[in-house]
Image (tube, rainbow, N blue to C red):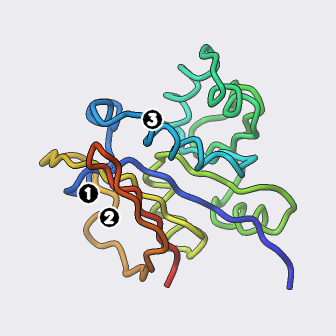
């Protein structure tokens, strides 16, 4: 049997399922535990997969930062899922040509480390529905936002998942990992 690369999706999420604009609500919960969890997510990855909007927000910030995580993100390969972006200027970035699902099926068969998706809700939804995500890592924050884009929108088909790991941080954030059931 051939080893395949794993795709790991990591998301900040509120108790009511909102994943939109975490930069506006998750910072009060940022501590050493959460920082370590995020660093752990990237530890075995050599590729970062982002949707266009997340790519643009990351590319506007990370190249100017200087710390261990910034060095890792700036150095790794980045794939951008976009039908509108023609060129990606951030170091080691490439826009995915054609169908994302087909491209990721092919990429999973190539040698390399894990492929991590950070944010990029439409990308996560598409790949979950296609059965391509090997681990869904949710950092559930103890806050109800009441509005905003949710991870699982109305009309999303069933995606059976099995809990594989659960850690509670001192801030009340839950670090939950799921795999396809």
User: Which residue lies at the image location 45% right of the left edge and 63% below the top edge?
Assistant: 125
Q: Position of residue 126 (x, y in %)?
A: 50, 64
**Label at residue 152:** 2
Instruction: Give whichever of discs 2 and 3 has the lower sequence position.
Output: 3
State the residue in front, 115 or 163: 163
Residue contact at pointers 3 and 1, CB within 8 angstroms: no
Q: CA distance from mark 3 to mark 1?
A: 24 Å
> Is 29 positioned to the left or the right of 10 in the image?
left
* Secondary element at tag 2: loop
Q: Position of residue 165 (x, y in %)?
A: 47, 68
Residue under label 3? 32
Residue 8 appears in which quarter of the rendering?
bottom right
Residue 114 appears in which quarter of the rendering?
bottom right
Quick check: 9 above or below 108? Answer: above
Q: CA distance from mark 2 to mark 1?
A: 7 Å
User: Which residue lies at the image location 77% right of the left edge and 61% below the top edge?
Assistant: 107
Crowd rating for badge 2 (residues with CA inside 10 Å; few <14, some 14–19, many 20+): some
User: Which residue lies at the image location 52% right of the left edge and 79% below the top edge?
Assistant: 180
Q: Position of residue 14 (x, y in %)?
A: 26, 50
* Secondary element at tag 1: loop
> Is 98 positioned to the left or the right of 85 in the image?
right
Dot in front, 2 or 3: 3
Residue 156 appears in which quarter of the rendering?
bottom left
Residue contact at pointers 2 and 1, CB within 8 angstroms: yes
Residue under label 1? 17
């Amino acid at each position: 049997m051939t080893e395949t690369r794993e795709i790991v999706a990591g998301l900040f999420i509120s108790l009511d399922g909102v994943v939109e604009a975490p930069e506006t609500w998750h910072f009060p919960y940022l501590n050493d535990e959460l920082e370590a969890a995020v660093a752990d997510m990237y530890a075995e990855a050599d590729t970062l997969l982002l949707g266009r909007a997340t790519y643009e927000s990351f590319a506007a910030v990370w190249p100017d930062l200087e710390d261990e995580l910034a060095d890792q993100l700036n150095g790794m390969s980045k794939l951008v899922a976009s039908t509108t972006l023609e060129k990606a200027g951030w170091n080691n970035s490439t826009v995915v040509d054609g169908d994302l699902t087909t491209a990721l099926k092919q990429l999973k068969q190539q040698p390399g480390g894990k492929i991590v998706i950070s944010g990029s809700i439409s990308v996560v939804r598409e790949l979950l529905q296609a059965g391509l995500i090997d681990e869904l890592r949710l950092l559930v924050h103890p806050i109800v936002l009441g509005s905003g884009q949710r991870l699982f929108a109305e009309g999303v088909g069933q995606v059976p998942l099995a809990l594989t790991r659960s850690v509670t941080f001192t801030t009340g954030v839950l670090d939950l990992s799921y795999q396809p059931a």
